[in-house]
């Protein structure tokens, strides 16, 4: 048995697969060459970069399993693959904590102007230090503020737990049912149930001081001009979910008008070449799609994915 880890795999996962007698190839085959080369493998693991569509699946009858390291599987034709007998697996829980922590990296960055200070201080910090000190003196605390979470799956819930631990109020919108409480694990083995309020999308937009997106790719942006018109003035927006879920042109207009106070973005349209005016905007905190990219998450993803693949390939 032979697996192509086209977007890489943690050494722990590679070791587990090899111990099970599965050869692991970690070379990256460009997308336009996969159709000619993938049939040499029994399975493939991907992250968000490689796409496994119907035409690729049809061209590779030897393919038995597709593994997605992470949550969203919008880069895979999941239903079609399963309909022709190809197993599809992902690791939805392994990176939840890492993504949730990145959300708060952007939130802390935003409320204390770190994103702008890091750009400005190397240029004028040595000559206008006190001016910058005054400029960034109007920060706010997260405690006591309301965060609206759009999409209340695993990552949305982990984000909510961090918010509740900071003393924030949480309101959530999801197309599916959400729990009325979340359990916070405290030191000493103590657990506390904390309430979460499910609201309509309009109520979330109107009441949230900060909004965090945790949804899969959508054909139509969830936040665009109509939604920005309904938010509280100065709201902070964080997107660590998928590019395309926010209309970037409308976001820039909302940032310029002050309707949106700042945005923290880990994902973008047109990755890996996001639009330059968004990357250079003075009110945007930036990371290059690294939500799940922590050592701990990669180890969990690699281990879980390897065990799932072994279950399909080793009888």
Image (tube, helix red, strand yellow):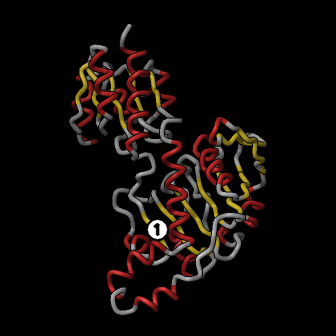
Instruction: Say left or right for 112 vs 156.
Output: left
Where is 230 relative to 309, above or below?
below
Q: Position of residue 284 (x, y in %)?
A: 48, 71
**Residue hosting label 1:** 285
Where is 310 relative to 219, above or below?
above
Q: Position of residue 36 (x, y in %)?
A: 22, 31
Crowding at dot 1, Cα within 10 Å, few <14 / some 14-19 / many 20+, comes out as: many
Instruction: Say left or right for 125 vs 201.
Output: left
Instruction: Say left or right for 208 vs 245.
Output: right
Say which residue appears at 51% left-offset and 63% top-offset.
106
Within the image, what quadrant is residue 127 found in?
bottom left
Q: Position of residue 15 (x, y in %)?
A: 29, 24
Along the line of sight, which residue is nearer the eye, 299 or 191? 191
Where is 229 relative to 133, above or below?
above
Within the image, what quadrant is residue 250 found in?
bottom right
> Which quarter of the rendering shows the N terminus?
top left
> Which quarter of the rendering shows the C terminus?
top left
Instruction: Say left or right for 9 vs 294.
Output: left
Q: Position of residue 237 (x, y in %)?
A: 58, 65
């Amino acid at each position: 048995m032979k697996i192509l880890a086209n977007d890489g795999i943690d050494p722990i996962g590679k070791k587990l697969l090899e111990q099970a007698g599965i050869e692991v190839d970690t070379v990256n085959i460009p997308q336009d060459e996969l159709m000619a080369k993938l049939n040499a493998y029994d399975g493939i693991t991907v992250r968000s970069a490689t796409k496994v569509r119907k035409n690729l699946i049809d061209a590779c009858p030897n393919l038995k399993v597709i593994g997605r390291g992470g949550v969203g599987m919008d880069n895979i034709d999941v239903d079609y693959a399963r309909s022709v007998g190809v197993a599809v697996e992902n690791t939805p829980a392994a990176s939840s904590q890492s993504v949730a922590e990145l959300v708060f990296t952007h939130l802390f960055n935003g409320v204390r102007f770190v994103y702008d200070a890091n750009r400005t201080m190397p240029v004028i910090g040595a000559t206008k230090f006190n001016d910058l000190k005054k400029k960034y003196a109007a920060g706010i605390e997260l405690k006591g503020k309301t965060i609206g979470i759009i999409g209340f799956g695993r990552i949305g819930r982990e984000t909510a737990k961090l918010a509740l631990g900071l003393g924030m109020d949480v309101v959530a919108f999801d197309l599916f049912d959400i729990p009325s409480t979340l359990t916070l694990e405290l030191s000493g083995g103590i657990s506390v149930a904390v309430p979460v309020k499910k609201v309509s999308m309009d109520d979330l937009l109107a009441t949230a001081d900060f909004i965090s997106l945790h949804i899969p790719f959508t054909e139509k942006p969830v936040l665009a001009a109509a939604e920005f018109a309904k938010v509280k003035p100065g709201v902070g927006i964080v997107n660590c979910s998928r590019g395309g879920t926010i209309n970037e042109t409308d976001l820039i207009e909302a940032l310029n008008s002050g309707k949106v106070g700042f945005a923290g973005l880990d994902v973008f349209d047109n990755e890996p070449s996001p639009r330059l005016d968004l990357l250079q905007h003075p009110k945007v905190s930036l990371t290059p799609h690294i939500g799940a990219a922590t050592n701990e998450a990669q180890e969990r993803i690699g281990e879980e994915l390897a065990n799932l693949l072994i279950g399909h390939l080793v009888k």
